[in-house]
Amino acid sequence: MQLINPGFGLVFWMTLIFLVVLFILKKYAWKPILASLKEREDSIENALKAAEEAKKEMAELKAKNEELLKKALEEKDALLAEARNIKDKIISEAREKANLEAKMIIENAREQIEMEKQATLGEIKNIIASYSIEIAEKVLREELSDKKKQKSYVEKLLKEIQLN
């Protein structure tokens, strides 16, 4: 029954030992424990602040990346449009150049044909003139007294010329 009803001495010594242990803990253990808890609390708080700042920075970086991507896509579209315009311009210029060259070739061919035609006509005139002179010489050599004879002779000469 002593444990259920402790005596005055036991309670006194237990209280005294408890106060001594409490004093020793307060003097040597509580300050370092509380300091380390405060330090840990501060480091956790700083880590949470850093994580929050990192989260904000990541959100800002994501927004900047999306903006850069949008700008890059716009620039790509602009470059493609410009390339298409340049391609169309080059094709158009090539067509125009080809048309001009074709017209020049056709014009040169026409001029050459005309020159050859004129040269041929000149040759024909020269041939006709020489035949005419030959006929005139032969007619003059022949006796020109008879008209029928002269006419038949001219026809004969013309047939000879046609055969040649």
Image: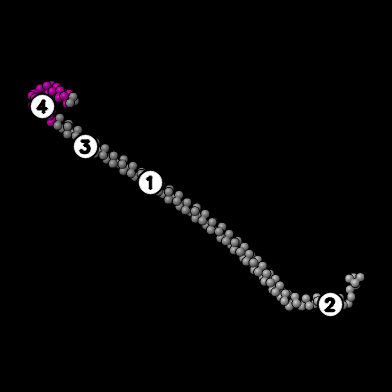
* Sooner in the amino-acid sequence: mark 4 or mark 1: 1
Residue for point 17% across, 23% down: 159
Badge 4 density bin: few <14, some 14–19, many ≥20, Cα 10 Å: some
Q: Which residues are magenta?
A: 132-161
Which mark is in front, 3 or 4?
3
Look at mark 4 in the image and give the residue it sits on.
138
Secondary structure, mark 4, is helix
Relative to 131, does residue 5 appear above or below in the rendering?
A: below
* Disc assigned to residue 119: 3
Instruction: Give the residue at mark 1.
Output: 94
Q: Is the residue under label 4 in contact with that under label 3 (CB below 8 Å)?
A: no
* Disc 1 versus disc 2: nearer the observer: 2
How much space separates mark 3 and mark 4, taking CA atoms?
A: 28 Å
Q: CA distance from mark 1 to mark 2?
A: 115 Å
Marked residue nearer the N-terminal end (1 or 2): 2
- Ranked by sequence position, the earlier of labels 3 and 4 is 3
The answer to whether one can see residue 97 in this image is yes
Classify residue 1 by image quadrant. bottom right
Q: Quadrant of the C terminus?
A: top left
Q: Is 92 on the left-hand or right-hand side of 68?
A: left
Side (left or right) of 55 relative to 86: right
Q: Which residue is mark 2?
A: 13
Identify the residue at image location x=57%, y=61%: 61
CA gap between label 4 and label 2 equals 178 Å
